[in-house]
Amino acid sequence: MSLTTADASLVAFSENADHVYNHAFRGFAGHLSDEDLELLRNRPEVDYVEQDAVVHIAAYTQQPGAPWGLARISHRRPGSTTYEYDDSAGAGTCAYVIDTGIDASHPEFQGRAAQVRSFVPGEETDGHGHGTHCAGTIGSRAYGVAKRTRLYGVKVLSDTGSGSYSGIIAGMDFAVQDSRRRSCPKGVVANLSLGGGFSAAINRAAAAMIRAGVFLSVAAGNDNRDAAGYSPASEPTVCTVGASTANDQRSSFSNFGRVVDIFAPGSNILSTWIGGRTNTISGTSMATPHITGLGAYLAGLEGFTDPQALCRRMQQLATRDVLTGLPSGTVNLLAFNGNPRG
């Protein structure tokens, strides 16, 4: 314990103290019984009693030759090829990829990934690649935003890339339940790089995940239209993500509108692929895992209050007014990880 105190209290309680402070700070640190703690707190000459805590070195890591999307979200200006990030890197968080599954054997995942459930009859693994690509952007070694998060695949899309809303809702419900039995002390995030026409049911399922404490980022959609007509993008409580290019333009395919919360790199994104390979593809599906990974990164670094507050934190950190090609009423916010040298 640490406290400031008068000399009389120091004499009485500091005999077995670990440290006694006499100059810049008047007080001591040591182990106290509950009885002594209560006694000190009630003495008028004691300003306060505070529990000791552990601090860590704040170290930023540089990844030269990084994919352009990672470099972009760690710098205020375009053109960098280095990803800079705090080495906490999402440790203590869990990230659910509700998609085509994850090829958990990919060496880029370093044993931190698992394919935990399938809601597609007769298909248990990722035979497509889309989910593995998203997982790689969230948390793989070379292509990931949060390189120490744990990744869990929930297969709701078939190997042809399609699935029903009912199956997707089942996967969302499972992710909430499953996360409660995992060790995720810094928080749980989830990625939905999928969508379709407006559905009250899937929007309500997404809102339920938020109420359960899961940060959920979802794709705005790839039809160059207002995302208000799409689900789950139109659910107000999720973090809806539009896509940008390396030249800081809105990707030509990206949906837009007032329901979009933030933009992230989504054109020509290099990431993991099934069979231990890599692939470069485009879509708001590729932008969304940048935000899911950033959610895990910030939760591990700064703490996790609630999912909506985490999305607002990203908006607060975001680089403003650099994107072009945005229709009126669409936010001009590009994801940024808070790199102090950015």
Image (cartoon, rainbow, N blue to C red):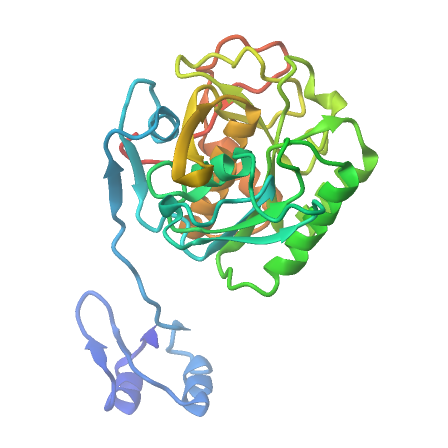
Q: Quadrant of the C terminus?
A: top left
> Above or below — where is 255 with respect to 55?
above
- Examine the image and state in which quarter residue 13 appears: bottom left
Query: At x 26% / y 82%, what residue is drawn?
Result: 7
| 121 or 300, nearer to the observer | 121
> Above or below — where is 73 with respect to 111?
above
Query: At x 40% / y 12%, what residue is drawn?
Result: 247
Specify the farthest residue to the front: 122
Specify the farthest residue to the right: 200
Query: At x 17% / y 69%, what residue is drawn?
Result: 23
Residue 144 appears in the rendering: no
Query: At x 68% / y 38%, what residue is drawn?
Result: 237
| 158 or 321, nearer to the observer | 158
- Residue 152 in the image: x percent, y percent? 54, 51
- Residue 277 in the image: x percent, y percent? 39, 35
Would you say 82 lies left or right of 320 here? left
Specify the farthest residue to the left: 23
Q: How many marks?
A: 0
